[in-house]
Image (cartoon, rainbow, N blue to C red):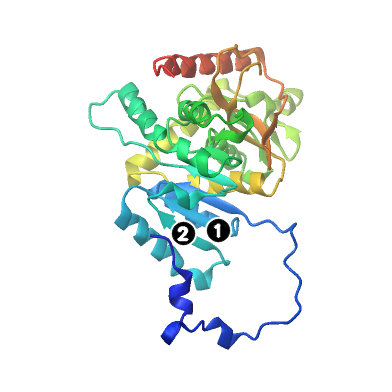
């Protein structure tokens, strides 16, 4: 299943064609030991996994990309399809296999694999099937890349990030869920559209569960460095809380709308995951709302629970959690969101 480099470089009789095209330089020194070779593995080659892989390639985030899936023909087809675009992309070695050994030495492993819900199936039963799937995914990733960072994209992302943490045995800073990074992007877009500004000038976070109990941090929104709500209050400009809640509701429902229209979401999560990969692998130390072990932050209790908080990301994974000021209402909503996730986790028996 893996790409064979030798097959294309050897001529008749096993002659290495590279020795004809290139005359070697004599008395060379070895490559600098400080130069990093970056490897990313993507587990699951469905619509989401391939959107992530494609974005990683176009943004030149890895020297090597490994794809893993349980369906050999689809996997090989996806690998070949990407390899055939090599002339249009930055140089990246692309491998694919049903065997997890292909992921060896990965700097970042992105897990997108997950069971699909069957008609009439309960969320708990679906979650338990995903846990069973993760039991076959996470341990071999940890075995072949003991120093990797795990990024979980599969849903329900918060609970499955907790599951991955438990199964991997990794310290919590090296297990991250994509969480509300995409929700926050949708939030920023809707606010920017409402105010007719560029979304990149909007600082706004959705935190908590990646789901119905997520929390919009209205009190900390700023546009171009100007705190929105306090500015409106100082200017004595009225705003309706219902209007704010409608924007948050639109964020929560936006994924459902995309799914109802095209059957799945893929491109936005591809950009979101690549955005996180860039911050981690290039040690950019940017703040992202991602699913992290939340114990002790913002009054969240002692039970182990992963949910999205504004976290600083770098080569070490999660470097810290930002001390964003929350109103009493926002803090209570965040604790309620943590309780919602904890109640689901308690049914897993892990």
Dots 1, 2 in contact, CB < 8 A: yes
- Could you tell me how far apart the alpha carbons at marks 1 and 2 are, in whole angstroms? 8 Å
Q: Residue drawn at (33%, 40%), measured in percent from left and top?
A: 260
Q: Residue drawn at (56%, 48%), measured in percent from left and top?
A: 106
Instruction: Judge whether 123 appears above or below 150 on screen.
Output: above
* SS assignment at label 2: strand
| Pointer 1 residue | 64
Name the residue nearer the viewer: 160 or 100.
Answer: 100
Q: Earlier in the sequence, mark 1 or mark 2?
A: 1
Residue 155 x %, y %: 42, 33
State the quadrant of the N terminus. Answer: bottom left
Residue 43 x %, y %: 44, 46
Residue 226 x %, y %: 75, 34
Q: Which mark is residue 95?
A: 2
Horizontal side of residue 99 vs 189, given as left or right: left
Question: Is residue 231 shown to the viewer in this render?
Answer: yes
Name the residue nearer the viewer: 251 or 297.
Answer: 297
Q: Quadrant of residue 59?
A: bottom right
């Amino acid at each position: 299943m893996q790409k064979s480099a030798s097959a294309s470089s050897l001529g008749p009789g096993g002659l290495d064609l590279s020795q004809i095209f290139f005359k070697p330089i004599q008395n060379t020194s070895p490559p600098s030991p400080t130069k990093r070779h970056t490897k990313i593995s993507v587990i699951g080659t469905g619509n989401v996994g391939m959107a992530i892989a494609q974005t990683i390639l176009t943004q030149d985030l890895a020297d090597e990309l490994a794809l893993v899936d349980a369906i050999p023909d689809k996997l090989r087809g996806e690998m070949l399809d990407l390899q055939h675009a090599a002339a249009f992309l930055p140089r990246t070695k692309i491998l694919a296999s049903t065997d997890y050994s292909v992921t060896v030495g990965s700097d970042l492993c992105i897990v997108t694999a997950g069971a699909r819900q069957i008609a009439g199936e309960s969320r708990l039963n679906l979650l338990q099937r995903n846990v069973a799937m993760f039991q076959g995914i996470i341990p071999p990733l940890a075995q072949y890349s003991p120093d990797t960072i795990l990024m979980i994209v599969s849903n329900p992302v918060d609970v499955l990030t907790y599951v991955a943490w438990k199964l991997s045995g990794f310290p919590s800073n090296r297990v991250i869920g994509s969480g509300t990074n995409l929700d926050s992007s949708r939030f920023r877009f809707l606010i920017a559209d409402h105010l007719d500004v560029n979304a990149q000038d909007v600082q706004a976070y959705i935190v908590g569960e990646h789901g119905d109990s997520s929390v919009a941090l209205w009190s900390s929104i700023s546009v171009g460095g100007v705190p929105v709500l306090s500015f409106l209050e100082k200017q004595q400009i009225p705003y309706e809380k219902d209007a704010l809640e409608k924007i948050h509701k639109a964020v929560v429902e936006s994924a459902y709308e995309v799914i109802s229209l095209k059957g799945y979401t893929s491109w936005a999560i591809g950009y979101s995951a690549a955005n996180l990969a860039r911050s981690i692998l290039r040690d950019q130390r940017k703040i992202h709302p991602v699913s992290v072990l939340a114990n002790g932050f913002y009054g969240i209790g002692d039970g182990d629970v992963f949910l999205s908080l504004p976290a600083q990301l770098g080569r070490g994974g999660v470097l810290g959690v930002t001390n964003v000021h929350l109103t009493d209402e926002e803090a209570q909503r965040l604790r309620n969101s943590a309780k919602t996730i904890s109640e689901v986790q308690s049914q897993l028996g892990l």
